[in-house]
Structures are given as C-alpha cells and as structure tokens.
Amino acid sequence: MERLLITGAAGQLGSVMRKKLTSLAPVIRLSDRAPLDPPAPNEECVECDLADAAAVHELVKGCDAIVHLGGISVERPFSEILDGNILGLYNLYEAARANGQPRILFASTNHTIGYYPQDERLTAGVPYRPDGLYGVSKCFGEALARMYFEKFGQETALVRIGSCMTEPLNYRMLSTWLSHDDFVSLVEAVFRAPVLGCPVVWGASANDAGWWDNSHIGWLGWHPKDNAEVYREKILANTPKPNPTDSLVRFQGGAFVDDPIHKD
C-alpha cells in the first residue's frame, strides 16, 4: 500500500498505533477531530469530524487501507454516539465506496456481547448482547460493514477489541487483554491477506483465561504471542478482589453493564 489512513489518531490507542504502524506504508495519513501533534516526514495530519460527509470523502481519497479507530469509545449521550459511530461510520463507508474501496480494519468492541457471562466461551457467530448504547452502535457498525461487503464487495475486518493497552489492569483484563504488539501483528495480517472478506475477529492476546474462540480465522495467519497471565500475580497483589456479585467478574462487558443510559 502507498497510503494508510488511521482515524482516531489522537486517541489513546490511535496515538500508540501512529508510532507502531509507521512502517506499513510510505505515507501515513492521520485523522481526528481533536488536534494532532505535528506530522513526521512520512505523515499527513488532517483534522476531520466524521459526521461531515464531504470532509470524510476528502479524507479517504487516495488511501489504500484504513485502520478505523475513530468515533466514541465509551458510553456517552446518544447524540455523540450517533454522530461519531453511526453517521460517522456511514460517511466512512460511502467515502470508501467512492474512492476505490480501500480495505478497512474496523475497531468494533467486546461490548457488542457484554451481557454474556464470563464462564461462557464464545464463537464469532453468537447473537449480539450489547451492554450499552456504545455497544449497540458497534453492532450497527458490524452490520453496516457486512452490508457493504455483500452489496459492494467492500472488505472489512470486524475486530472486537477487548482491552488494548500496555498491560492488563484488573481481573477481567486477564481475559480481555490485547497487547499493543499483538494488535500491530493483527493489522499486518489483515492487510497482508490476499482475500479478506468480512470476518469477525476477537481482539485479544493469547490469554490463558481467554473467553473467545478465533479458530474460524486460522487462515488469516494471525498468531498473538502475548499472554495476560504473566501479570496475574501483580494484579492479585495490587488490585482488591471483587465481590462475586460485582459485574466486573460476572459479565464479559464488566462494569459497562452498570453504566446508565446517558442523557444529553
């Protein structure tokens, strides 16, 4: 590829991927509605609101691949989720359709299935059980991506990210953790595959306590190497053990199931 677009590049995960994905293309186009740090020699920085269809069309123009991390990533008032995750995603897919259909890695979330209990191992085909409006918006996003694939052939990896950070921080993350390096290797695998289609991918490292079965995407050639288990003793020593009735240890979505519906 010649130009890779990373949306949400000013966010927590986007700012990390900005540094770690720099070798994937000669030009990295970075976008966010928040200000971005000045560009490196191989970077292009574009301030863009995903709810602005014309701006998104120009943003996608000339790009060969998209890592879509943009939008709202936590439970927020519906108006914010509507603009960032529903209207904004529609604008992105329309822009991709008009600009040669660059392959997309869509950052979906484990909160599409957050109400499943933690003692149940899930395959990619289980019904949605979202734990909030944020999770519902990602269910919409996965359905939208699937429709664009079926109708237009737009390829997308639907990556249900668990907890992508430097290290796991609590008991739940011993199951959901996705290391930065494993996410990078997943991005590489998605854009390396000769044919992608529109698969669901569970975004988690090779955790001993994992809940999600990725056997259906063995053909992708992604083999996560990190394991949250190496942090178990640290978590046991530094994190109070939750009550067995706490959502953090009952539901796969953790505390998200307790979030209220936020009003504007």
Image: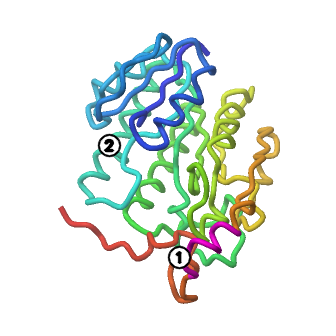
Element at badge 2? helix
| Residue contact between numbered discs 1 and 2, judged by CB atoms under 8 Å | no
Instruction: Give how far apart the Cα atoms at labels 1 and 2 are.
Output: 31 Å
Residue farthest front in this picture? 237
Residue situated furthest left in the rendering: 264
CA neighbours of label 1 inside 10 A, class few (<14), some (14 to 19), many (20+): many
Q: Tell me if residue 234 is in the magenta stretch.
A: yes
Which quadrant of the figure contains the N terminus?
top right
Residue type indicated by callout 1: Leu
The amino acid sitting under disc 2 is Leu
Point out which mark residue 19 bears.
none
Q: In this picture, is 155 found above or below 119?
A: above
- Residue 126 percent coordinates (x, y): 64, 65
Occupied quadrant, residue 35: top left
- Residue 89 position by quadrant: top left
- Asked if residue 33 lies left or right of residue 5, the reply is left
Tell me which residue sits at (47%, 40%) in the image. Answer: 69
Which of the two marks, 1 or 2, is nearer to us in this view?
1
For label 1, the residue is 248
Point out residue 84 in the picture as x, y percentages from the top left corner. Answer: 33, 45
The percent coordinates of residue 38 (x first, y second) are 36, 20
- The dominant secondary structure in magenta is helix
SS under mark 1: helix
Using the image, tell me which numbered label, if any, was put on residue 87.
2
* Membership of 252 in magenta stretch: no
x and y, in percent, of residue 65 in the image: 55, 24
The residue segment tinted magenta is 233-241
Tell which of 236 and 8 is nearer to you. 236
Residue drawn at point x = 57 percent, y = 22 percent: 22
Q: Is residue 230 left or right of residue 135?
A: right
**229 is higher (above) or lower (below) than 258:** above
The answer to which of marks 1 and 2 sits earlier in the sequence is: 2
